[in-house]
Image (cartoon, rainbow, N blue to C red):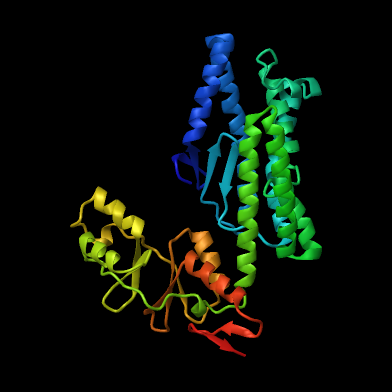
Amino acid sequence: MTWSVNIGSIAGTAVRIHVTFVLFLVWIFAASWTQGGIDAAWSGLVFMLLVFACVLAHEFGHIFAARTFGVATPNVTLLPIGGVARLERIPEAPGEEFLVAVAGPMVNVVIAALLIVLFGADPSVRNLAAMESSATAMVDRLAAVNIFLVLFNMIPAFPMDGGRVLRALLAIKLGHVRATEIAAWIGQAAAFVFGFVGLFGNPLLIFIAIFVYLAASSEAQLVAIRAMSRDVPVSAAMITEFATLAPDEPIEAAIETLLRTSQQEFPVVDGQRRLVGVLSRADMIRALKQVGPHAAVADVMTVDVPLMSHRGRLEHAFRTLQEKQKPAVGIVDAAGRLVGLVTSETIGEMLMVREALPRGVRLGPWGPATGI
């Protein structure tokens, strides 16, 4: 996620803080100082840091549950509206998604229970309504916050935890794609409610509404694309005519190639036409500013680009692009030579064309439309 910095890692997952989160803490400190002086400012700051520690623990509940199903968890980012754990994929099996979704709120249940049993916290409705008041004991406020996190996150507004639980339950009968469509529609409707309520009281709800709406729309689209790509050969969506770069070429030569083409990603190949990296248009411009025109392409290219056979399926390429966060997937022949390139843009364009074709006409395995 852009505008975020890495502050360390926990159990192999990078912990990142978004710049807006820091600004939010500064605002909390200043607002508390204005209302109650320096002691209130420090108390408010400590409380918010403890709240976000609980949020972080919530996200690691999802992370550790996902790992039990073989899902990698590269990082988690703290935002003013909460935490976002990046999983390489969301489990499609309803039971697995259900367990991953409820793992986060269960962590908050455990934290609230420990605060009540070990420290005598009072989780009453009175303290739940006074979470922002420094007159209430901090342990009581923390218990109330964790209860609130459970209740709020279990609202069935996809892609919040409650929405993912809803999708998992719907998927048992309706399948993953249809369940996603219904859960996303409910999430978007809930976003409108959040936004409307936020206009009359809590501006933070407006930001939550925007996040929920966009995230629900995005995931519904991704699931639909994945479903459409299942029966499509990867060769139908790969680029077969493209300019390549050599690892030892200078950036200035790459820029000249860029100006002659309309490509966004340029494969970097060795003498045997084996893919060793990819250099994007954005990478070229950034390298030109940072290291100069005479630096070698090999010094600034993206390495470890995933490869797959030209006989593979498009669904696998699409999933790889999502999970590996790479600009492209290299398509190779039996000898390992590069024969094509697949990007998110080419997949989207190919599927749009495929949907627009008349019934009974499909894209052939290597390009043009053919009748069947």
Residue in the picture at 25% in, 49% down = 289
Relative height, residue 349 to residue 195 (above, below): below
Relative height, residue 4 to residue 26 (above, below): below
Comparing 15 with 18, the one in front is 18
Give the number of callouts: 0
Residue in the picture at 62% in, 42% down = 210
What percent of the width, then of the height, locates residue 185?
73, 53
Q: Quadrant of residue 358?
A: bottom right
Q: Quadrant of residue 360?
A: bottom right
What residue occupies the far left of the structure in this picture? 294
Q: Quadrant where the C terminus lies? A: bottom right
What percent of the width, then of the height, locates residue 69?
64, 58
What percent of the width, then of the height, locates residue 41?
55, 15
Relative height, residue 260 to residue 202 (above, below): below
Comparing 336 with 243, the one in front is 243
Is residue 69 at all visible to an observer of this figure? no
Residue in the picture at 53% in, 67% down = 348
Q: Quadrant of residue 220?
A: bottom right
On the picture, is 80 further left or further right than 266? right
What residue occupies the far bottom of the structure in this picture? 372
On the picture, is 227 further left or further right than 253? right
Is residue 346 at all visible to an observer of this figure? yes
What percent of the width, then of the height, locates residue 35?
59, 11
On the picture, is 7 further left or further right than 221? left
Residue in the picture at 66% in, 82% down = 359
